[in-house]
Image: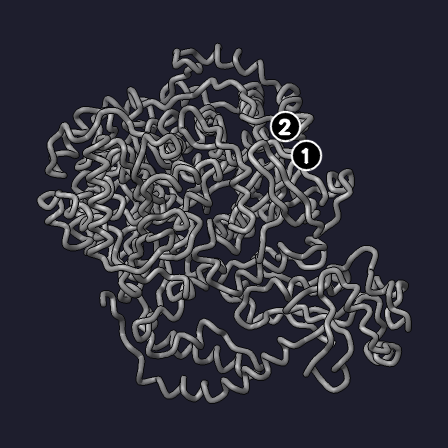
């Protein structure tokens, strides 16, 4: 119709070339999509796995259905309770029902102030780093400006000191490919 | 437009991204088969330029138009997902008629025959005023123009309204009464020249994100730029605030007068500007001098305003001094000022601040209203899409205006009624009462968006309702007797006019989905079936409609004669007045460089730098209004102790027909919530994410609490987007007696934990 502009189909081969990698790219992205958090009050993963007896009481206790059984994640963590923030982030309840019901003390109150995971922004996937105005992670962060904040160019940054790793930012991110990931 | 160099750059970026295992979705998706077309974003009133990527008859990608000076290639996250809306499963593809209570598919012939027959029966039995049209600030100018001709010119009723009544009417009233002409004096260009942004009732960061970026860039490159916010709620806009005043919702009129009081008493006013350029009038329209204005202001000391508004007097003085000391100042406002029982007065009082200090008509200074919808200014305010106006800033009450329009429309002058029709709230009340028996609703969703919405469902249920829509279902189509599939953005050409008087052309780049048709042609074909064959025979293309409308703007303050389709297709919009094809458009009205001002005889410009020549101005002068303070329509009380205010969020737009089609946006903002200040939440024993019951005098709903330090204590905020939690059912439908705009922004509410 109107306003057709120069077609650049002679470069199509380059795109085909790139598309060869698409599957691989997709896979690696999916891995990130599956990045998970350990429940509140847990120690490092190794210790958590040792103590947890898979009674799943914590999963039943979670009022926000944020805890779930790890499935097809990796051999170490599969079948243990985890949080998938891309599906449901942790509400960080003040009374931590998950910790209260944990008999084997895989989850303990004294560790409830530990962050659930370390969060990092994937700048290549983040709209704010790619000419789009997007602030969903910052506006939805339950902690406020201190854990994730915008710089003077509206690009988000994480302040790891203040972040509790609840994963709300991951849950809320509207990017097509996850622009926030968990680093272990 | 993607040239070879850009393509190589893109490829390099993709390669770089691939090397670290991630991809740029937009750039990868936009493969080499993509044709790029210059257009305008479908969402808010900013008017960002977009490039539409089309491939194989589908819209595949959207990117910012880096040649458009409004947004310089930037977009907000909503725009990115527009292709999903175009090809959504919720698109309405066929005409539908309600049979035995259910909407069933039919063909165009049957659907339009039915509408024409019903409308003609109603008209014959009850007169033209038993019919009504309710349009939209998202409709193209050409579409609203067709509706205007059919209803006002042919059917002979002024019952023609549009949803800008719900968002911009108070700004129109404010501009007309203060500076004699609708729409701002300056443009966005002033953003890069100003020393102060005063944001009043505007969450710019979420509602007008790209303008917010421009404000931030100005502040970054010029750190002495000040940002003052006046808003009952802390919003994401606050990240750049130097000072924030938190008035109680609806109690800011005294505050604006108090700022004027400080400006007057601290010697910040420009007496020579006031003398040469303004009248001073009281609420009854009686003329006064500066001395009596000062006396009037003595009643609004900062202390008194503090007692009324809840803002500390010291902050009021501080804000006034920042305003006074700034060499140039921009005030930006949106719904917080407009959706009010005294919205026009609030607008007047804000414009006063610029008139008394002479901070208007010079680069970097303006009283600048931000519009909510992409064509509220262009199609409805300029195009005459409300019950009291006609195309080209004309009035139905003015005999000469009626004559001029009737002549161009080729209808007898007596067809256009001299009395304004029913304004929006009166129109839906008319449906309830049975005074209006048939309504045509185009490109909007009133069953969701009206204030006190449930009250007006009755009339929609009882009367004959035609809805022309691109999406199904909406809350309004639930009540429709006939639903007509409308072509959506990118499937039709037309013009949008944004906040800064800029008209921009949008091409049709793909075929309409299913059997959808362009709204202007649906109206044309309906008109023909109703018996107005002769009157509508000529409208075969969008350009014919635009040219006829363009002719009606000749010699008006909003002269668009130079904005031909041919030219608009090449440029990134034109800012009126643009009287000839050679004219570049006008940055500042009423002053040097404005072709209408420049053409004025020298004696009119003597001893002054501006001449307000607009349709409502006398002697080229603006008006400083002595408006008293007024409380909101529904103050809080012991029974309903909390002020409810409503608004928007970044990820969504209006009633979700478009943004709701993107799963990513739904994930980012999945449902409604009520923001409660932690102080209030503690008192009420409410925790974050608790379900609470919200009640006003009009109804109640259950909603999730978000305990957050955003609304000031005593105020709660709910976004209005979701039909599952339609907060507008709880909103007050009290309206401004001047602008007829309802007071969405203040309602008395109570909250209880469930």
Identify which residue is drawn at 31% across, 33% down: B436
Decide if residue B525 is on the left or right side of residue B84: left
Quadrant in the rendering for residue B6: bottom left
Label 2 or label 1, whichever comes before in sequence order:
2
B44 or B239: which is nearer to us? B44
B487 or B579: which is nearer to us? B487
Q: Position of residue B341 (x, y in %)?
A: 49, 27
Q: Position of residue A135 (x, y in %)?
A: 58, 57
Identify which residue is drawn at 32% across, 69% down: B36
Decide if residue B289 is on the left or right side of residue B116: right
The label on residue B636 is 2
B555 w.r.t. B189: above or below:
above
**Dot 2: within a 10 Å radius of its alpha carbon, few (fewer than 14), some, or many (20 or more) residues?**
some
The label on residue B714 is 1
Decide if residue B307 is on the left or right side of residue B527: right
Q: Secondary structure at mark 1?
A: loop
Q: Quadrant of the N terminus of chain B?
A: bottom left
Quote the CA–CA distance across marks 2 and 1.
Answer: 9 Å
Quadrant in the rendering for residue B170: top left
Q: Secondary structure at mark 2?
A: loop
Query: Outermost residue toward the left?
Result: B534
Identify which residue is drawn at 71% across, 45% down: B754
Q: Disc 2, disc 1: CB below 8 Å?
A: yes
Same subunit under labels 2 and 1?
yes
Q: Position of residue B135 (x, y in %)?
A: 33, 43
Q: Is residue B613 visible?
A: no
**Dot 1: within a 10 Å radius of its alpha carbon, few (fewer than 14), some, or many (20 or more) residues?**
some
B124 w.r.t. B582: above or below:
above
């Amino acid at each position: 119709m109107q306003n057709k502009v120069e077609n650049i189909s002679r470069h199509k081969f380059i795109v085909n070339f790139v598309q060869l990698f698409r599957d691989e790219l997709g896979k690696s992205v999916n891995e990130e999509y599956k990045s998970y958090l350990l429940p509140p009050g847990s120690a490092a993963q190794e210790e958590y796995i040792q103590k947890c007896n898979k009674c799943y009481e914590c999963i039943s206790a979670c009022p926000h259905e944020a805890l779930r059984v790890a499935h097809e994640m990796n051999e170490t963590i599969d079948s243990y309770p985890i949080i998938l923030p891309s599906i449901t982030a942790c509400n960080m309840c003040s009374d931590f029902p998950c910790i209260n019901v944990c008999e084997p003390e895989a989850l303990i109150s004294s560790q409830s102030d530990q962050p659930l995971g370390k969060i990092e922004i994937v700048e290549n996937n983040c709209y704010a780093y790619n000419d789009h105005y997007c602030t969903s992670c910052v506006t939805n962060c339950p902690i406020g400006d201190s854990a994730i904040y915008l710089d003077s160019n509206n690009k988000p940054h994480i302040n790891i000191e203040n972040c509790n790793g609840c994963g709300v930012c991951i849950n809320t991110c509207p990017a097509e490919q996850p622009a926030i990931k968990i680093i272990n | 437009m993607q040239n070879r160099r850009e393509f190589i750059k893109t490829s390099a970026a993709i390669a770089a991204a691939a090397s670290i295992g991630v991809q740029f979705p937009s750039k990868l998706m936009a493969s080499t088969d993509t044709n790029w077309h210059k257009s305008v974003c479908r969402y808010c009133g900013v008017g960002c330029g977009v490039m539409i990527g089309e491939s194989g008859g589908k819209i595949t990608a959207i990117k910012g138009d880096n040649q458009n000076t409004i947004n310089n290639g930037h977009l907000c996250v909503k725009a990115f997902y527009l292709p999903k809306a175009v090809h959504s499963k919720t698109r309405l593809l066929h005409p539908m008629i309600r049979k035995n209570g259910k909407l069933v598919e039919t063909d165009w012939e049957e659907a339009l025959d039915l509408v024409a027959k019903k409308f003609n029966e109603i008209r014959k039995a009850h007169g033209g005023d038993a019919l009504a049209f309710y349009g939209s600030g998202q409709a193209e100018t050409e579409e609203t123009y067709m509706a205007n001709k059919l209803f006002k010119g042919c059917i002979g009723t002024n019952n023609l309204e549009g949803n800008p009544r719900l968002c911009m009417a108070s700004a129109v009233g404010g501009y007309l009464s203060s500076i004699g002409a609708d729409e701002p004096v300056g443009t966005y260009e002033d953003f890069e020249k100003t020393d102060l942004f005063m944001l009043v009732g505007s969450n710019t960061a979420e509602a007008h994100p790209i303008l917010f970026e421009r404000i931030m860039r100005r502040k970054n490159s010029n750190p002495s730029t000040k940002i003052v916010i006046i808003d009952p709620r802390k919003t994401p806009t606050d990240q750049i605030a130097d000072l924030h005043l938190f008035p109680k919702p609806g109690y800011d009129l005294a505050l604006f007068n108090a700022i004027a009081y400080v400006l007057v008493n601290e010697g910040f006013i420009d007496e020579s500007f006031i003398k040469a350029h303004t009248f001073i009038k009281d609420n009854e329209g009686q003329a006064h001098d500066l001395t009596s204005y000062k006396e009037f202001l003595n009643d609004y000391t900062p202390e008194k305003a503090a007692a009324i508004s809840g803002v500390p007097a010291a902050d009021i003085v501080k804000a006034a001094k920042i305003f006074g000391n700034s060499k140039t100042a921009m005030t930006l406002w949106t719904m917080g000022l407009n959706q009010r029982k005294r919205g026009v007065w609030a607008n007047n009082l804000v414009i006063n601040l610029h008139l008394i200090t002479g901070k208007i008509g010079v680069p970097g200074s303006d009283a600048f209203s931000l519009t909510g919808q992409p064509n509220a200014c262009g199609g409805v305010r300029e195009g005459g899409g409300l019950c009291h106006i006609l195309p080209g800033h004309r009035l139905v009450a003015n005999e000469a205006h009626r004559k001029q329009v009737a002549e161009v429309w080729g209808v007898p002058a007596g067809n256009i009624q001299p009395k304004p029709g029913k304004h929006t709230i009166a129109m839906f009340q008319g449906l309830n009462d049975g005074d209006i028996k048939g309504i045509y609703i185009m490109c909007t969703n009133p069953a969701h968006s009206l204030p006190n919405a449930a009250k007006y469902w009755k009339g929609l249920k009882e009367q004959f309702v035609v809805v022309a829509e691109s999406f199904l279902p909406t809350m309004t189509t639930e009540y429709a007797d006939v639903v007509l599939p409308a072509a959506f953005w990118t499937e039709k050409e037309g013009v949008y006019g944004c906040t800064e008087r800029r008209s921009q052309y949008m091409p049709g780049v793909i075929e309409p989905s299913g059997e959808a048709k362009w709204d202007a042609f649906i109206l044309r074909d309906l008109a023909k079936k109703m018996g107005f064959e002769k009157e509508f025979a000529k409208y075969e293309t969008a350009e014919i409609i635009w040219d006829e409308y363009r002719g009606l703007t000749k010699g008006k303050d909003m002269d668009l004669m130079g904005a031909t389709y041919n030219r608009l297709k090449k440029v990134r919009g034109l800012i009126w007045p643009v009287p000839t094809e050679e004219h570049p458009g006008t940055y500042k009205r009423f002053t040097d460089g404005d072709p209408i001002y420049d053409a004025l005889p020298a004696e009119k410009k003597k001893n002054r730098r501006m001449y307000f020549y607009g349709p409502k101005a006398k002697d080229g002068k603006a008006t400083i209004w002595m408006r008293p303070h007024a409380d909101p329509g529904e103050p809080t009380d012991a029974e309903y102790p909390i002020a409810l205010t409503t608004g928007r969020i970044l990820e969504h737009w209006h009633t979700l027909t478009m943004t709701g089609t993107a799963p990513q946006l739904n994930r980012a903002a999945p449902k409604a919530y009520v923001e409660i200040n932690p102080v209030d939440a503690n008192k009420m024993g409410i925790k974050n994410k608790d379900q609470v019951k919200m009640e006003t005098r009009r109804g109640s709903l259950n909603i999730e609490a978000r305990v957050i330090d955003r609304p000031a204590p005593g105020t709660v905020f709910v976004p209005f987007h979701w039909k599952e939690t339609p907060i507008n059912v709880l909103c007050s439908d009290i309206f401004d007696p001047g602008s007829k705009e309802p007071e969405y922004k203040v309602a008395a509410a109570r909250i209880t934990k469930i």
